[in-house]
Image (spheres, rainbow, N blue to C red):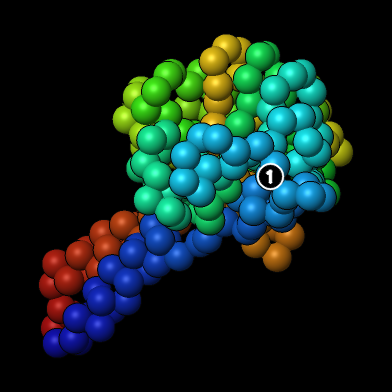
Amino acid sequence: MTNRKPLLWFAMTAAMFAANGAEATVITVANPSFEILPAGGLTVDGCGPGCVYSIDAPIPGWTSAGTFWGQFQPGVQDGNFTYFNSVPDGITVAYMESAGTIEQTVAVVAQAGVTYTLQVDLGFRKDFPDPGTITLLIGSTPVVAIGIPAPFSGNWANYTATYTALATDAGDPISILLSSSGTQGDFDNVRLSDNLVAGVPEPSTLALFGFGLLGLAGMRVLRSKPAAT
């Protein structure tokens, strides 16, 4: 009798690889964690140990509109937990108030059939609510990121927006839009990726996993078939 255990192992391995093997391709975002400071640094203080910020000073790599926006070091590196318990990446974040925006258009353009994923950490200050909004823009198509809010906690939540480009989106610019409609939005750790591998969209993970299951089913059929006499 043929030993089909190696074949069964191969089918199971193929199914596992199909579910977990493909990884997203990172799209470069300039100054994604806002650690690059404006010329002259952050000049406004008076908010506690290690706490400094800028007001309407250019954020390197980003364009801004509205009033009262900039970069903010809440001071957690010096034990100042008045505003946040931590900062996701580095010691600096971006903030926005008064219905303003912080925006960046990346170097790549949309390709039909490619899925784009934006992730940004949204902060929730301890002292007042943070109605920050994170939007992935494919041309003029907005996709608002969603996550689990944590009001007044001093913590950060990962917000995600995902969009698969249509044929009509091909060649459109891809932009990241951070905005606030009220008190303050705080943002950090901006990440953008697509599902391209060597310039070709990845096959569906679900479809690959299905092939692995078909392989397992085939091994079962062979195993149950009576041997020829």
The residue furthest right is 171
Label 1 secondary element: loop
Name which residue lies at 61% across and 31% down: 95
Work out which quarter of the rendered image holds the N terminus and state it: bottom left
* Image coordinates for residue 199, horizontal then vertical, percent: 74, 60
Q: Is residue 140 left or right of residue 33?
A: right
Where does residue 140 sit, x and y in percent of width and height? 78, 22
Whether residue 118 is visible, yes or no, is no
Q: Nearer the viewer, residue 37 or 2?
A: 37
Residue 123 rendering spot, x and y as whole percentages:
46, 34
Name the foreground residue: 222 vs 169: 169
Residue 36 vs 5, above or below: the answer is: above
| Residue with the most extreme front position | 46
Q: Which residue occupies 26% across, 59% down?
A: 217
Q: In which quadrant of the rendered view does residue 132 lie?
A: top right
Asked if residue 124 is positioned above or below residue 17 in the image, the reply reads above
Amino acid type indicated by mark 1:
Leu
Q: Nearer the viewer, residue 116 or 28?
A: 28
Please state the horizontal and vertical placement of residue 203, each as a whole percent of the image: 56, 53
In this view, 17 is above or below 180: below
- Residue at horizontal 19 percent and vertical 81 percent from the top: 5
Q: Residues within 10 Å of mark 1 (few under 14, many from 20)?
A: some
Residue drawn at (70%, 42%), measured in percent from left and top?
Answer: 43
- Per the image, the residue denoted by label 1 is 42
